[in-house]
Amino acid sequence: MSADYKKITLDGLWGNNPALVQLLGLCPLLAVTGSVVNAIGLGLASTLVLMGSNLTVSAFRKFVPDSVRLPIFVMIIASFVTAIELLMKAFTYELYLILGIFIPLIVTNCAIMGRADAFACKNPVKASLLDGLMMGLGFSAVLILLGAMREALGLGTLFSDMQLLFGPAAESWKITLVEDYTGFLFAVLPPGAFVGMGLLIALKNIIDSRLQQRKAEVASDPGSRPERVRVTG
């Protein structure tokens, strides 16, 4: 049976988004999204681990006994997390210190373990790799959007401290939205993250509801359907 790559892509980015629909991995998502650079850093780390663990689990799925599959999946995920942790220590040490315990805790991220057990161990390598990439991008998009909201409201800036991830050339990427902004502490603290996350989930539900309503209107109105024209030569 061939994999439905379009469905895998749409599920990861929107229909079954790990943060907005499955509500997985919320602990690091709410904890570190105080700025855009933190969100990008955790998003990249989570996406790379998702892709690596999905690929490895899928490649060796026929050799893993079902009774011990979960401990083996944890070991595979922990190996990739350790590699990412060492890379961050080598190249983005200051950002690694800011993200702190939430990099090692990617091992316990339910979104990553869930994809390994629910998808990668039942599907071929190519589909599993795409699933890891799309789930990671969907998760990262929510991280970055929430990080941008909290940084804009809390600090009045966007893209501050990007040099922590992209090097000295990124120091000029900072955008000051409001001069002499005194800050909004609530947006930076965890309660602000909960409110922001709730707003994003509500926005997704509204968009889905409008799309379904539009489909129902088109289906119930025969006049809105495109007419089929028979052409004979």
Image (cartoon, grey):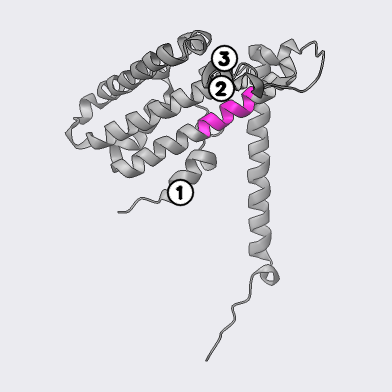
Label tally: 3
Residue closest to the far front: 169
* Circle 3: residue type: Ala
Q: At 67% across and 33% down in the image, what residue appears?
A: 202
Taking the view exactly as shown, the residue that stands out farthest to the bottom is 233
First in sequence, mark 2 or 3: give its number. Answer: 3
Q: Residue at x 68, y 19 (%)?
A: 151
The percent coordinates of residue 165 (x first, y second) are 52, 19
CA distance for labels 1 and 2: 26 Å
Looking at the rendered structure, the secondary structure element under dot 2 is helix
**Is 157 in front, or is 191?**
157
Q: Quick one: quadrant of the N terminus?
A: bottom left
To which residue does mark 2 refer? Answer: 39
Q: Amino acid at mark 2?
A: Ala
- Direction from residue 100 to residue 228 in the image, left or right: right
In the image, 44: left or right of 30?
left
Where on the picture, by quarter, is residue 131? top left
Residue annotated with mark 1: 7
Quadrant position of residue 108: top left
Q: Which residue is mark 3?
A: 31
User: Does 23 sit above or below residue 99?
Assistant: below
State the CA–CA distance, disc 1 to disc 3.
Answer: 31 Å
Q: What range is drawn magenta here?
A: 138-147
Q: Position of residue 143 (x, y in %)?
A: 57, 26
Query: SS at mark 1?
Result: helix
